[in-house]
Image (spheres, rainbow, N blue to C red):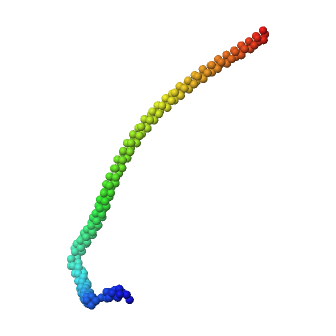
Amino acid sequence: MSKAQVVYRAQSKPDARDMGRITALEGEISSCTRELEQLQSKSGSIESAIKDLEKKILDIGGSRLLKQKSTVDGIKLHINLANDEITKAEVGKAKAEKDVVKLASAIESNTESVREVDEELDQLKQQLAEVAEYLEELKEKVEAAQAAAENSKDDLENLKLQLEAKREEIKAFRDKEVRTTELLSITLLTV
C-alpha cells in the first residue's frame, strides 16, 4: 500500500468527535420523528373534530348555511377563474410587448429598405426616361430612314424608268445603226 492510500484511508474514517456528533444527530432525528408522529395523530383527531363540527353546524344552520357555503365556493371558483384569465392576459401582454419590439425593429428595417428601394426606383425612372428619350430619337431616325428609303425607292423607280427609256432609245439607235450599216453595205456592194 502506498503512503497516499494510507493517508486517504485515515482521512476517510470519521474521528471520535464526528462519531459523537452523528450519534447526537441520530438521537435528535429519532425524537423529532416521535414528536411528528404525535402531532400527526393529534392533527388527525383535530381534523375529525372539525368535520364533526362542520356536520353539526350544517345540521343546525341547515340550508341557509349550505347556500352560503355554496356561494363562497362559487366566489372562490370565480376568483380562481379570474386569476387564470389575469395570468393569461399578463402572458399575452408580455408576448405582445415583445412582438411590438420585434415589429418596431422590423418596421424600422423595412422603412430603411423602402427608402433604398425608393432611391433605386428613382434611378430606374431616370434610366427609363433616358431610354424612352433614346427610343424616341431612334424612332425619329428610323422614320427618317424609312422616308429616305421611300424616297430612294421612288428615285430608284424613276431611275429604272429612265434607264428603261434610255435602253429603248439605245435599242432603237442600234436598230437604226444596224439598218444603216446594212444599207451602206448594200449600197457599197452595189457600187
Q: Nearer the viewer, residue 72 or 82?
A: 82
Answer above or below: position of 62 versus 179.
Answer: below
Q: Residue furthest right?
A: 190
Q: Position of residue 7 (x, y in %)?
A: 33, 87
Answer above or below: position of 70 versus 107.
Answer: below
Q: Residue furthest top?
A: 191
Query: Quarter of the image holding residue 173?
Result: top right
Q: Nearer the viewer, residue 31 or 50?
A: 31
User: Residue at the location (74% across, 12% down)?
Assistant: 184
Query: Quarter of the image holding residue 68?
Result: bottom left
Query: Quarter of the image holding residue 8?
Result: bottom left
Q: Nearer the viewer, residue 156 or 189?
A: 189
Q: Residue furthest front?
A: 3
Answer above or below: position of 181 versus 69.
Answer: above
**Camera sees residue 18:** yes
Q: How many marks?
A: 0
**Apparent side of residue 125 relative to residue 15 in the rendered image (left or right):** right
The C terminus appears in which quarter of the rendering?
top right
User: Residue at the location (25% across, 70% down)?
Assistant: 76
The N terminus appears in which quarter of the rendering?
bottom left
User: Residue at the location (68% across, 17% down)?
Assistant: 174
**Camera sees residue 96:** no
Q: Position of residue 117 (x, y in %)?
A: 37, 47
Q: Position of residue 116 (x, y in %)?
A: 36, 47
Answer above or below: position of 161 versus 36.
Answer: above
User: Residue at the location (60% across, 20% down)?
Assistant: 162
**Apparent side of residue 116 relative to residue 51 in the rendered image (left or right):** right
